[in-house]
Image (spheres, rainbow, N blue to C red):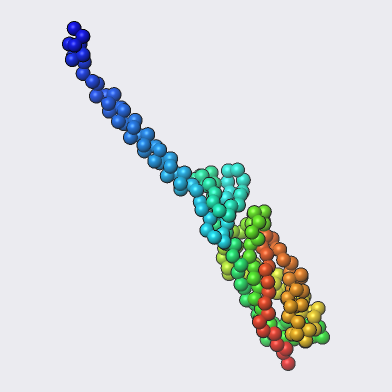
């Protein structure tokens, strides 16, 4: 009697298909979840930083960070030093002590400080677009640089500046300041200095 009962019981295909469906759905969910996690990990290239904003407040990362879509936004900031050339030629010469006029061509090296607080300050005060665009950054800094070079040259004699460019460089860096709204002025190099007659 037991044998006939077992022979008459047929497996229900519903449970078989339910098992297959649940297995496939689980694999799809695990795959999608893994893909979202991998897509949310942002690796920072060399000489760059990622500024993440949104849920949890702003944060800066130099190696990798986790960005959750719809909760976070992120922007990459270039940390490399940039060289900007400035010139003061015949139409707008610099004026030294004794009203001596001279033409000057010099380079200024500017970069974003590599400290998280400084990067946040620069992003807030200057903007990430300006920090990443060399021409916008030059336009932002030009008035400060021009004013500083005028102040330095008005306090120096032309011959003193010509013979001791390191002193002029030190005075310029002291006048303009080494740090400015999260940016650092690394150096200044005077390439051309000549007196106008």
Residue 166 position, x and y percent, is 74, 78
Relative to residue 152, is residue 4 depicted above or below? above
Q: Quadrant of residue 143?
A: bottom right
Q: Residue furthest bottom?
A: 197
x 57%, y 61%: residue = 47
Q: Residue furthest top?
A: 1
Q: Quadrant of the C terminus?
A: bottom right
Does residue 75 appear anywhere in the picture?
no
Q: Quadrant of the N terminus?
A: top left
Along the horizontal axis of the image, is 19 left or right of 197? left
Q: Quadrant of residue 184?
A: bottom right
Residue 15 position, x and y percent, is 29, 24
x 46%, y 46%: residue = 38
Q: In this orientation, which residue lies closer to the viewer: 150 or 117?
A: 117
x 19%, y 11%: residue = 3
Along the horizontal axis of the image, is 4 left or right of 188? left
Does residue 177 appear anywhere in the picture?
yes
Q: Quadrant of residue 12?
A: top left
Q: In this orientation, which residue lies closer to the viewer: 103 or 165?
A: 165
Q: In this orientation, which residue lies closer to the viewer: 14 or 63?
A: 63
Residue 101 position, x and y percent, is 74, 86
Residue 52 position, x and y percent, is 57, 50
Along the horizontal axis of the image, is 187 left or right of 70? right
x 66%, y 73%: residue = 108
């Amino acid at each position: 009697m037991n044998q006939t009962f077992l022979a008459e019981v047929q497996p229900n295909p519903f449970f078989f298909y339910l098992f297959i469906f649940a297995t496939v759905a689980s694999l799809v969910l695990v795959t999608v979840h893994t893909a979202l996690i991998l897509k949310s990990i942002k690796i920072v290239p060399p000489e760059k930083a990622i500024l993440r904003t949104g849920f949890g407040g702003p944060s800066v990362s130099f190696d990798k960070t986790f960005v959750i879509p719809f909760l976070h936004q992120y922007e990459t900031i270039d940390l490399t030093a940039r060289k900007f050339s400035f010139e003061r030629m015949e139409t707008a010469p610099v004026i030294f002590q004794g009203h001596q006029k001279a033409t000057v061509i010099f380079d200024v090296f500017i970069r974003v400080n590599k400290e998280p607080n400084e990067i946040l300050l620069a992003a807030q005060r200057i903007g990430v677009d300006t920090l990443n665009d060399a021409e916008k950054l030059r336009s932002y800094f030009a008035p400060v640089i021009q004013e500083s070079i005028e102040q330095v040259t008005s306090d120096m004699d032309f011959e003193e500046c010509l013979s001791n460019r390191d002193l002029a460089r030190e005075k310029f860096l002291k006048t303009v300041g080494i740090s400015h709204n999260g940016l650092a002025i690394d150096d200044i190099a005077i390439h051309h200095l000549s007196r106008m007659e």
